Image (spheres, helix red, strand yellow):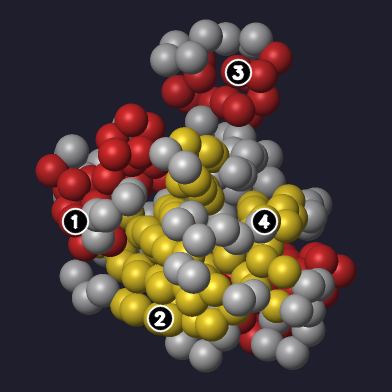
């Protein structure tokens, strides 16, 4: 695995980012897509739905179009417009491809309006602050809705099956909007962006212990030791002074 690195001076802080991706033990190829920008505050992870041509096309298209669409525009309205462009591009990429063309999209973006998280699907963004690890994003799945509304118990077969039913994703025919979250930065904060190949295999308690000093390479190797049931991609962003 090749570890990507970037350092950004942003909002009075030095942000250090590391990123990587590994192919799960049961896959012949990696359908996750990762972008870590060296020139500006931008990290993107996308997880293709399924393991076919549509999955590969969706993830690559979503990441490329989001990067291009956010190059010169700023603020929440521009981020929504960038995701709308992603939706159109992924749907167009799926024309002529049998099966579903769709993917998740989770991004960390910094501009003069602040630091933003952009969320579609069930990849995730966490923040570790003062020893507390918080999940900042919401999983756009039927399972998340079911657990919130008490439709079924956590860990049940029904909840497991519903975890594969995404309610929002890039390429969705209804072109749903993303969640946008403006996040403050404090020295010592650690952000983690990851696909479900990380979050489904590494327990919360282990992530909370690991993130203060652990590397991306070590985290991804741990997903393989835990079974490697899915491709795994992660970005760790550390906020300095």
| SS of the residue under disc 4 | strand
- Give the Cα distance between marks 3 and 4: 26 Å
| SS of the residue under disc 2 | strand
Residue under the point 63% across and 70% down? 109
**Residue 99 drawn at (x, y percent):** 53, 55
Which residue is at the front of the view, 55 or 85? 85
Residue under the point 47% across and 42% down? 130
Q: Earlier in the sequence, mark 4 or mark 1?
A: 4
Question: How busy is the neighbourhood of tag 2: few (under 14 within 10 Å), some, or many (20 plus)?
Answer: some
Residue denoted by label 2: 6
* Residue 17 showing in the rendered view: yes
Q: Earlier in the sequence, mark 2 or mark 4?
A: 2
| SS of the residue under disc 3 | helix
**Residue 190 drawn at (x, y percent):** 44, 55
- Give the Cα distance between marks 1 and 2: 18 Å
Q: Are marks 3 and 1 in contact (CB under 8 Å)?
A: no
Residue under the point 79% across and 55% down? 177
Viewer-side label of 2, 3: 2
Which image quadrant is residue 145 in?
top right
* Residue 178 showing in the rendered view: no
Q: Earlier in the sequence, mark 3 or mark 1?
A: 3
Q: Earlier in the sequence, mark 1 or mark 2?
A: 2
Q: Earlier in the sequence, mark 3 or mark 4?
A: 3
Residue denoted by label 4: 183
Residue denoted by label 1: 218
| SS of the residue under disc 1 | helix
Q: Are marks 4 and 1 in contact (CB under 8 Å)?
A: no
């Amino acid at each position: 695995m090749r570890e990507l690195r970037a350092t950004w001076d942003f909002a009075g802080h030095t942000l250090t980012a590391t990123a990587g991706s590994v192919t799960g033990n049961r896959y012949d190829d990696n359908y996750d897509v990762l972008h870590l920008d060296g020139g500006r505050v931008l990290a993107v992870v996308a997880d293709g739905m399924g393991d076919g041509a549509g999955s590969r096309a969706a993830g690559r298209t979503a990441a490329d179009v989001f990067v291009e669409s956010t190059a010169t525009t700023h603020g929440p309205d521009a981020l929504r417009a960038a995701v709308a462009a992603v939706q159109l591009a992924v749907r167009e990429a799926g024309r002529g491809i049998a099966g579903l063309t769709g993917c998740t999209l989770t991004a960390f973006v910094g501009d003069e309006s602040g630091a933003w998280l952009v969320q579609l699907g069930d990849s995730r963004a966490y923040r570790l602050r003062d020893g507390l690890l918080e999940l900042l994003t919401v999983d756009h799945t039927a399972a998340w809705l079911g657990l919130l509304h008490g439709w079924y118990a956590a860990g049940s077969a029904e909840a497991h099956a519903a975890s594969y039913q995404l309610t929002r994703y890039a390429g969705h025919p209804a072109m749903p909007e993303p969640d946008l979250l403006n996040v403050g930065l404090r020295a010592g904060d650690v952000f983690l962006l990851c696909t479900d190949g990380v979050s489904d295999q590494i327990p919360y308690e282990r992530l909370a212990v690991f993130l203060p000093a652990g590397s991306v390479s070590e985290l991804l190797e741990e997903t393989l030791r835990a079974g490697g049931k899915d491709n795994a991609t992660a970005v760790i962003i550390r906020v300095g002074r």
